[in-house]
Image (cartoon, rainbow, N blue to C red):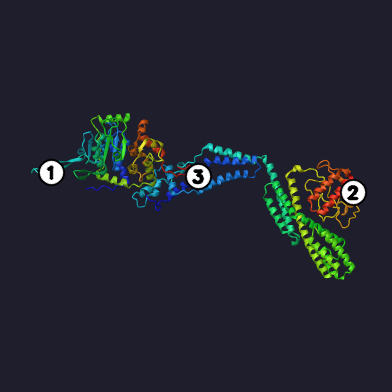
Amino acid sequence: MTTSPPMNPERYAQLAQAIEGQVRQVIVGQEQVVRTVLTALLCEGHVLLEGVPGLGKTRLLTTLSEVLQLSFGRIQFTPDLMPADVVGTQVLESDADGNRSFRFRPGPVFNGLILADEINRATPKTQSALLEAMAERSVTVAGTTRAVPRPFLVMATQNPIEQEGTYPLPEAQLDRFMFKATVPFPSADELVQIITQTTGLHQNQPAAVVDAATLAAMIGLTRQVPVPQDVVRHAVDLVVCTQPDNDKSPKAIQQYVRAGASPRGAQALILGAKAAALLDGRPSASSDDVRRLAYAALSHRLVLGYEAAADGTSAEDLVGDLLENVPTSGSGVRGAP
Amino acid sequence: MTNSSRSRSRGFGRLILRGRRRIRLVWMSATSTRFGPIVAAVAVLLAGLGWLRPWFWPESAALGVLCLGIVGLLATALAMRLPDLIVARSLDKGLKTSDALVGALEVPDDDPFATSVRERADSFVDSDLRKAMPIQLRWKPWLATGSLLVLLTALIVIANPQDTRRDEIVAQQAAVDDVADEIEKLAEELSELPDNEVDQTTIDKLNALAEEIRKTDSVEDATEKLEQAQTELLRELGSDKLSERAASDGLEQTLEQNPVAPGETAAEQLAAAAEQVDELTDEQAQELADRLDDLAETQRDGDPETAEALAEAAEALREGDSDAAAAALDAAGSAANETASSVERGKNTEGAAGEIGDQARALRTEDSPASEAPGDGSQLAGQSPSQSPGQRSGSTPGPSNGPGGGPQPGSGPGSGEDGPTVLIPDGGDSTLLGADGEQTGSGTVNRDQQVNGPTGSGTVEVPLSEVANEFAEQAGDAVDRSSLAPSEAATVERYFEALQGQEN
């Protein structure tokens, strides 16, 4: 039995770099999405991916499961999907003696990495079954509560185009996702590379970089990263200024937002900033980290009014406006930064 | 994170120190860029006021505003409180260190990341702060400030129309101060006199007046105050004082010319007479009683107390009561002495009023150069009863340069007995009128008259008929202003009426 070396910022950065390297062998482009997913993973948070089909969302998860040596479960959400199809169910079995007993057959939620594909196509009841597992990191079936394995990452996808017959996630459930990332369509060069890479005989196979224990150590180290009070204050300012009834909020927020981000938004910003600092090889989080993660952590937490839809204003536009109007703490001295 | 400074490196401390200095410099630059044009504009406006009004303060105020701005800028920069956290924040932003310095300031010593956080902060200690916190020089505000300063210099250096007026004001103020000095000097002189010869209230009033006119900001005000003070002092003297003075002076003169006993003053003579009463014969006592009755009659209006004592003495002498006569004479001497002291105080007060009046006229002349009208030297002055007959003095200050300063000898026979005599104003042949109104002598009046303004001079001879009315009028004015006893004033009035009647 070999003992892995203790986790420290340097090793963390090396491992994270190695993970990203392996993922990029398979996933062409999408650096921002990969970084967001990896950040959420290192914070043990969940990610909501939004993008049209065929952009590599599933592939990203399967690659990560191979690199991280985590079990992978995929749930294709459909209107007839039942909660038991997600969390598992009790089945009646009889042994050789003819004795019958109930045995719990775990659902796909009992995996380290879960892809909840097109989550908005299932009924709210089924969605809630998964969302409970995401929040509590445990599942209760037939009166028995069972913990899901750790690390535990749920990556849900939504198709922003086909909205007919879907059940949009309510705000409370959206809030369970640490980040939301929009998967952009690849550029032409990236597409050429994707085509070349996926249509030949040989396809890149990612190598395993870390195991679950190492990943757990990395997650543990992420939480230890120091955060200056100014940075915490800036994250709080950003979240507070998403509230439409706040006097200091930007005008666009006051006009278009019906409900602002919850405190979970500020938690996501700070925790994400810690992971981002380590990923960049820095020992402490900064306001810049917070600002870089603002789109991913806040856009899905803003509940927009009909005025926003009428004016064509998106949540991302509003977060951009927020960042422009809420500066980081400076010296407050005229002329000095 | 909690604040911890124990494990900070020396280099990190120096970086914070350099950052603090740089922030002060950058602040001064930015503040002067922003407020420099405003301060310069205010200074120019103030200096511009000095071109519009003869005020003394605008130029000083303009320079003061400028200096205040500079000093205020430096003082504020030095006094500006810049804690380490503020400096670190600014450095983080300027150096783009992703809050490394703020993190190093706050990280606790026992934090597992403390060492790496501080090592990272130390990697920035040699950073060039000039690039991190550049001094932003915007040429438009500085050009505006420079232009305004040039304009300010021009406004201050170039002579402006108000300078002359300011010089005049300085001169006038100096004149006012001189007058105040004179009045203080007068008060001091009066204070050196014996107590019975001067009224302390007068001295206090003079000192207060000097202080008051020093505070005035114009010659006009000072003159007004002087005239008010003069009027007030003269009012205090009143007609009672004047008749008292006439009585006292009359008694002194009468006894000087025709003594009742040895002694220099009336009081001494009366006291000596009291001692000699026992030695008088009946005839001498009767004669003295008659004298005393006559003297009592002259004192009746001005000095009733002395008059009463003299009348009592006369009555006692007629009754042969020498003791009572001696006591009454002693009382008369004391009363006469007291009256003389009171008269002396009044004279000094009157002299002070006259001096104040002279100063007021001098100031008024200073205030209005146009008043340099040729003087004719005909003003009667020195109407004090103690003035010797045949003397006049021109007391009008200023450019008046007519004749009238010399003593005029009286040439008439003047047969009045011990009575005051009055001088005809100006002229070679003066006529004296006895106290009883007997007029003797006549002639024309010659007087020097300045005919061609201040630089001209000449002598004209005019008939008395042409000047009699004018003289009578001037004499009337002079009598009204003076402190002559009513009986003497009436004598003067009768004299000039007679003069007018003669010519008519």
Q: Examine the image and state in which quarter residue B155 appears.
A: top right
The amino acid type found where label 2 is placed reads: Asp
> What residue sits right under mark 1 in the picture?
A101
B82 or B399, nearer to the observer: B399
Mark 2 or 3 closer to N-term? 3
- Residue A281: x and y in percent read 34, 43
Task: Name the spot of residue B186 as percent of width and height, x first.
Answer: 74, 55
Q: Secondary structure at mark 1?
A: strand
Question: Which three-letter amino acid code belongs to the residue tagged 3?
Answer: Leu
Q: Is residue A36 visible?
A: yes
Residue B25, which numbered label? 3
Horizontal arrangement in the rendering, residue B315 relative to residue A218 (left or right): right
For label 2, the crowd category at 10 Å Cα-Cα, with few meaning under 14, some 14 to 19 and many 20 or more, is: some
Up the image or down, B7 lies above or below A50; here it is below
The amino acid at mark 1 is Ser
Q: Are marks 2 and 1 in contact (CB under 8 Å)?
A: no
Determine if marks 2 and 1 fall on one subunit: no
In front: B208, or B472? B472
Residue B193 in percent (x, y) is at: 75, 60
Q: Residue B429 bears which disc, if any? A: 2
